[in-house]
Amino acid sequence: MELIHLKILLALQRRGSLIAAADELCLTQSALSHQIKNLEKKLGVVLWRKHGRKLVLTQAGSYLCDIAESVLTTVDAAERHLRLLSEGKTGNLIIGVDCHACYEWFNTFLFQYLQAWPCLEIEVTSKYRFNALEAISHYQLDALMTADPGDIAGIRFQPLFDFELKLLVAKSHPLAVKESVVPKHLSEETVLTYPVDEQRLDMFQKVLVPNSISPGMHKTVEETAIMLQMVAAGRGVCLLPEWVVGEGMHSQEQLVALPVTGIDLKKTMYLATREEDSELEYIRWLVDFVHKKYLRKARNTD
Amino acid sequence: MELIHLKILLALQRRGSLIAAADELCLTQSALSHQIKNLEKKLGVVLWRKHGRKLVLTQAGSYLCDIAESVLTTVDAAERHLRLLSEGKTGNLIIGVDCHACYEWFNTFLFQYLQAWPCLEIEVTSKYRFNALEAISHYQLDALMTADPGDIAGIRFQPLFDFELKLLVAKSHPLAVKESVVPKHLSEETVLTYPVDEQRLDMFQKVLVPNSISPGMHKTVEETAIMLQMVAAGRGVCLLPEWVVGEGMHSQEQLVALPVTGIDLKKTMYLATREEDSELEYIRWLVDFVHKKYLRKARNTD
DNA sequence: ATTAACAATGAAATTTATTCATAATGGAAT
DNA sequence: ATTCCATTATGAATAAATTTCATTGTTAAT
């Protein structure tokens, strides 16, 4: 059975005669007749019968007509959806986040994004944190917020904004009075990080390891908010972008962000997408939106 | 979009490679490649992409795959159903009844019929009472219980059983003491009939009109049970087959059935079906079942 | 490097669908 | 009845599509 058969039955039912149905389908009456004859032979059922000079659907015929209604509706909807997809008007955007902090940051304007693209299904996940680029290639993820651009074929990294990692300490902490810190200061401190491989932690890769320093203690924390609470409570220090300390956050006034002297902790946040998708309207919009947001902020702080 | 495209996507998802999918569909890898390429051109979407030497479905591709799942399931089920239909193992049997009494009678063995044909959808209706044969031709009705066979092309009447119309009167009625009645007796009586055209009432067509008798009064009643109640209460008489007075019926012992002398009121009940359907197993079964039922009854009353 | 596994592609071959022309049918009008 | 007229069915010719074949291109593994 093919879709054409279903189309013929439905057109016949709607228009009342084969000639009219053929007209609707831009075919000849003969074509429809041959097609249904074939189908009848294959299925071993009679679908319509001449009754006077009208065609009357048999039981089997009107049963198939019901099926046709449902199947063709589904298929039509799918074709419309795909057309929208191809025009970039709709889509299903799954954005991965690479680090916990990104998640917090993205949340600050997710609401605006959702409003700007009402037809876009947006999902934010940290599920593919450890193989995110592969997940993009495999269409499990459509975009990734990351500060670690790779050079991977088929994936494009668009810079979003620059930031610097700082050492967060409690206001009450002895280091808090300093203008800046040096790696050596950490040898007595409890260092807090996310529970991921040390190779993925700038604290180790850029600060501790190159200077052969081991911290007083190393503890891992799952959630950014909890990590900040612990720092505020004087239970440790951590290396994070300054903006993780949100505007209205409880721990905001109890934390100090100190630059680390002698080490380049300037980073850039990127949006990684498949090359094919990087010009999609809703991706461009996202990148542009973030650029504008940071341009404004930069002007304000001037 | 055609079903083949959906089949290809689904086979690819299931089997992991085009070659395997082609094997499943009994086609060559080349055919599938060409087909999807065509569809992609028509829809303006990319459905899969080579990734290494594997194919990976794009977002659009896996969306279509979901559609495919649903559509092909529906279509497969329909094809199976039609195949069963063509073998007469299943069906949708809408049985019309011509006269109210038939309805009562059919009910006496409907339960057995339902049990014997569990896959058959059975519906009994009196909706097409006045154009029932046309309704059969138009597949609105599949069978009709009627005592008035016509000679209509394409419709076959199979005799079910013979019966005789009798005059039902109350036990307390003056006529009840007689062995039989003659038409003249009705000139003083209140005659009860169903509310249909006089031409369709044997009471008028066979008894009153040929003998130029007008009854004392003519009242119409919708329901057989109510008509019998009224007769039992002495509010009138009616002409019905004896068997409408059911076994456990309340009015049973208060009614007398009198033959009408000098008029042939013997009739035969028929099952009318489209000629094409008359050999369907579940139709044959129905006819045979009724025959056996009446054969047994005839033996019992010997 | 070589090979094996897979997909893409162009052209030829094949199959399928469509049309054209016409027959057949049934209803309506004369 | 006979003659339209409107419709569907059908066979053969034509057109279009699908499929295959043969080959190229790519990638991963040995």
Image (cartoon, coloured by chain):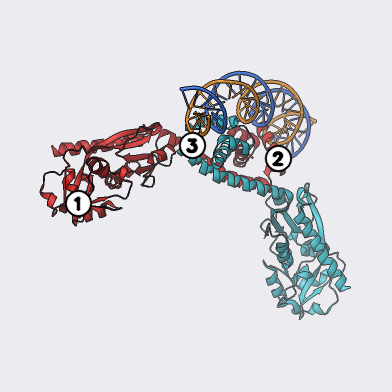
Chain colours: A cyan, B red, C orange, D blue
Q: Chain of mark 2?
A: B
Q: Secondary structure at mark 2?
A: helix
- In this view, the residue in front, B156 or A156, is B156
Q: Earlier in the sequence, mark 1 or mark 2?
A: 2
Q: Chain of mark 3?
A: A
Residue that numbered label 2 is attached to: B42
Q: Residue B189: give its label.
A: 1
Q: Chain of mark 1?
A: B
Residue that numbered label 3 is attached to: A56
Q: Is residue A201 above or below residue B22?
A: below
Query: Is residue A147 among the parts visible in the rendering?
Result: no
Which residue type carries mark 2? Lys
- In this view, the residue in front, A221 or B138, is B138
Q: CA distance from mark 1 to mark 3?
A: 48 Å
Which residue type carries mark 1? Glu
Q: Secondary structure at mark 1?
A: loop
- Pinpoint residue A134: horizontal percent, then vertical percent: 71, 50
